Amino acid sequence: MTRSIRNWLWILVFVVLVTFSVPWFLWGSATVVAGLPVWLWWHVGWLGLTAVVFALFGRTGWDRLMGVAPEAPPSFRPLSERDWHLQYVPCYPYFVPEVVDTDGDLVPYGERGTVRLTVLSEEFFIPLLYERDVAIRVRGTGRLPWDWLGTPETSEQAGQDAVEGVY
């Protein structure tokens, strides 16, 4: 299934959730089940269904239409050419990560260093923000030529004042 079909399916799922969140078809019904009106049972059941759908969306579709950067697909760089677990492709030019050493200089490709992030959006600009994470600097390829992050993880030396989770 293509990405655009999955996007439209998620949109359809959320339209249905919103449409039936208010039990308009139960208006005027005085039916009582276990001492409570049936419309109240509808709300309780719908809340449970919505929680399940959001959990599924969080695991499989969170990057859809949200601007969240995906992991690099194997079509960009085959798994056999990777010597790390995860390649994070930032949403350039809104999130520009750099992998730097302790002096603030870029590390060579394939080396691990501290993640320094510049964020630019309509709402705010954060230049050269040092994250508490470390990652491997990965050379971009194909249609995504900017630097990627390989196997990002929390640094063991991270201090209490470090910022977490901007990218």
Image (cartoon, rainbow, N blue to C red):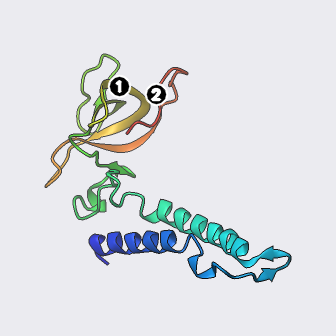
Q: Residue at x 28, y 45 (%)?
A: 90
Total numbered labels placed on residues in the image? 2
As rendered, which of 74 and 33 lies closer to the eye?
Answer: 33
Task: State the CA–CA distance, disc 1 to disc 2.
Answer: 8 Å
Find numbered disc 1 in the image and state the secondary structure of the residue it sits on. Answer: strand
Q: In the rendered image, which residue does mark 1 sit on?
A: 129
Q: In the rendered image, which residue does mark 2 sit on?
A: 163
The kind of residue on which mark 2 rests is Val
As rendered, which of 158 and 21 lies closer to the eye?
Answer: 21
Name the side, left or right, on which 138 lies relative to 58.
left
Find numbered disc 2 in the image and state the secondary structure of the residue it sits on. Answer: loop
Residue sitting farthest toward the front: 28
Residue 113 horizontal/vertical position (percent) = 35, 30
Q: Residue at x 35, y 19 (%)?
A: 102
Q: Quadrant of residue 94?
A: top left
Q: Quadrant of the C terminus?
A: top left
Residue 34 visible in the shown view: yes
Crowding at mark 1 (Cα within 10 Å: few <14, some 14-19, many 20+): some
The kind of residue on which mark 1 rests is Leu
Q: Quadrant of the N terminus?
A: bottom left
**On screen, 1 above or below 108?**
below
Name the side, left or right, on which 91 lies relative to 42.
left
Q: Residue at x 74, y 81 (%)?
A: 30
Badges 1 and 2: C-beta atoms under 8 Å apart? yes
Residue 83 visible in the shown view: no
